[in-house]
Structures are given as structure tokens and as C-alpha cells.
């Protein structure tokens, strides 16, 4: 890690924050309604701790085992851990122990297992529903038209609390191409809110990465998930 530019991390975070604020103000939103999830997957603890020293509040991780190791090493920092990777139900137990918010629930099976594990530790696990808004065959996420049914099932589970929706649109070079997908997630959130399912909140929209977060903010993101702009390209 000798070649890593530690000093740049603080600067990069400041720059991302500045872009969040500027974009929010330009579209008439309160910058404080948007939270930065710093995506630290594959980054070792020495590097992540540099970001933590810059006062970030949320770390996003994709792999359960990696996150568990990091949380043990970085326990001194008061940071909230979010899970943004694909969740296998055999990892649900560890997931509920560590994560304040799980962004990627997309099936009844995962929801049931998370509920079961959360019950064991007397926790109410906050989750988001990952939606495959573009209908990509290979992608994680539930189909938009099936989301309400899943929410109705989850609303019966006492140890899960749905806070909103998440999406990861198909990658295209022009970030503007993501706009219709972000818009679709926003509108789906509104529709589901109006469905008035008990115990379900639609306050959070997790959307936007390094590539397209300003567009996501313009379309209503409340959580942006950013790695590369902060740590540089992953190997
Ligand atoms: C890796 C990852 C990100 C961060 O992407 P960057 O392009 O590095 O900002 C965001 N969301 C998810 C789901 C990811 O897997």
C-alpha cells in the first residue's frame, strides 16, 4: 500500500460533499436530506480509517466477511455500517449483528431469514427493498410490479422495518441514461407510500454512485453510495 495517496481521501470526501450540497441547492432540496454512504469494499482498514478520520458517518460494504473483519478493527470509530451487496440468507445472522441498514432485500426468503435472526437478538432490522427498475435479466432486485406484494408480506414481520427503496441502474457511459431509472424508483416509492401498508416507510431512496450521483440527487436520492470518487479505482 506504499503508493496509496492517503492525503487525497479527505480532499475527495470534501469534494463529494461539496457536489452533494451544490446539486441539492440547485434543485431546491435541503442538502441535509441526502446522506453520503462511503463505499469501502476491497479497501483495507488503513485506508478506510483515513476516511473515518474525515468524519464520515456511514460506511457501505458489499461482503459480509470483509465487513466483519473491518468492523472489528475499526471499532473505535462511531460509524454506521450499511450493507449494499447481494445478501445470501446463510449470512443473515452476521448481517443483522453488524448492519444498521441493509439496502438489498429483494425476496421473501431473505426477508424471512433476516426477521428470524433479528428476532433472536431482539432487534428491529432496518431494510430497503432493492428494485430492478430496468428489468435487467441478470441483475439483483425485485421487479417493480412485485414490490407491493413483497412489502405486504414484510409488513407482517415484527423484526423488520422497511425504510424505502434502492436501485442500481444499468451502467451506461452517459450518467443521464440513469435518470429514467432513478425517476422510476422515486415514482414507485410514491405509489407504495400511497398504498398505506402498515409499518412501511418510503422515506429513503438509495440511488447514485460515483458515476451518476448528481443525477440521482436531482431525482430524489436520500442515500448516495460512493466509493471510487473517494478511494480511487478499485483493483
Ligand atoms: C461498489 C458499489 C457502489 C460504489 O460504486 P462507485 O462507482 O465506486 O462509487 C455503489 N453501490 C453498490 C451497490 C456497489 O456495489
Image (spheres, rainbow, N blue to C red):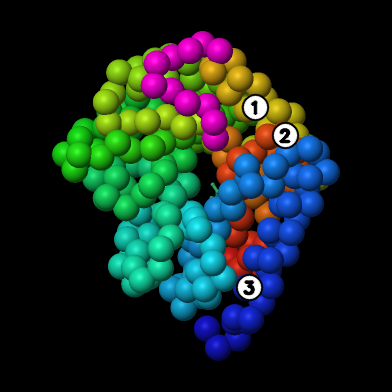
Measure the C-alpha gap from mark 2 to mark 1: 7 Å
Label 1 sits on residue: 186
Q: Is residue 213 left or right of residue 151?
A: right
Q: Which mark is residue 10?
A: 3
Tag 2 residue: 219
Dot 3 or dot 2, earlier in sequence: 3
89 relative to 76, above or below: above
Q: Are marks 2 and 1 in contact (CB under 8 Å)?
A: yes
Residue depicted at 57% across the width and 40% down the height? 206
- Residue that extends furthest to the bottom in the rendered view of this protein: 2
Q: Residues within 10 Å of mark 3 (few under 14, many from 20)?
A: some
Task: Tell me the magenta residue range.
Answer: 194-204
Q: Determine which of the numbered discs, if any, sits on residue 227 in the image.
A: none
Q: Residue furthest left?
A: 120
Secondary structure beneath disc 2? loop
Residue 200's image quarter?
top left
Amino acid at each position: 500500500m506504499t503508493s496509496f495517496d492517503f492525503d487525497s481521501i479527505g480532499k475527495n470526501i470534501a469534494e463529494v460533499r461539496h457536489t452533494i450540497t451544490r446539486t441539492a441547492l440547485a434543485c431546491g432540496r435541503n442538502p441535509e436530506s441526502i446522506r453520503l454512504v462511503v463505499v469501502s469494499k476491497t479497501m483495507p482498514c488503513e485506508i478506510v480509517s483515513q476516511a473515518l478520520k474525515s468524519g464520515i458517518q456511514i460506511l457501505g460494504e458489499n461482503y459480509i466477511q470483509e465487513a466483519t473483519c473491518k468492523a472489528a478493527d475499526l471499532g473505535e470509530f462511531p460509524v454506521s455500517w450499511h450493507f449494499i451487496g447481494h445478501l445470501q440468507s446463510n449470512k443473515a445472522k452476521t448481517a443483522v449483528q453488524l448492519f444498521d441498514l441493509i439496502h438489498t432485500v429483494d425476496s421473501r426468503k431473505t426477508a424471512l431469514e433476516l426477521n428470524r435472526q433479528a428476532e433472536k437478538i431482539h432487534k428491529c432490522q432496518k431494510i430497503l427493498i432493492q428494485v430492478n427498475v430496468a428489468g435487467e435479466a441478470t441483475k439483483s432486485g425485485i421487479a417493480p410490479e412485485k414490490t407491493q406484494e413483497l412489502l405486504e408480506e414484510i409488513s407482517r414481520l415484527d423484526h423488520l422495518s422497511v425504510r424505502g427503496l434502492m436501485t442500481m441502474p444499468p451502467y451506461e457511459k452517459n450518467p443521464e441514461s440513469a435518470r429514467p431509472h432513478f425517476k422510476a424508483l422515486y415514482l414507485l416509492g410514491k405509489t407504495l407510500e400511497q398504498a398505506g401498508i402498515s409499518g412501511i416507510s418510503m422515506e429513503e431512496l438509495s440511488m447514485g454512485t460515483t458515476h451518476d450521483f448528481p443525477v440521482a440527487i436531482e431525482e430524489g436520492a436520500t442515500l448516495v453510495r460512493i466509493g471510487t470518487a473517494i478511494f480511487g479505482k478499485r483493483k
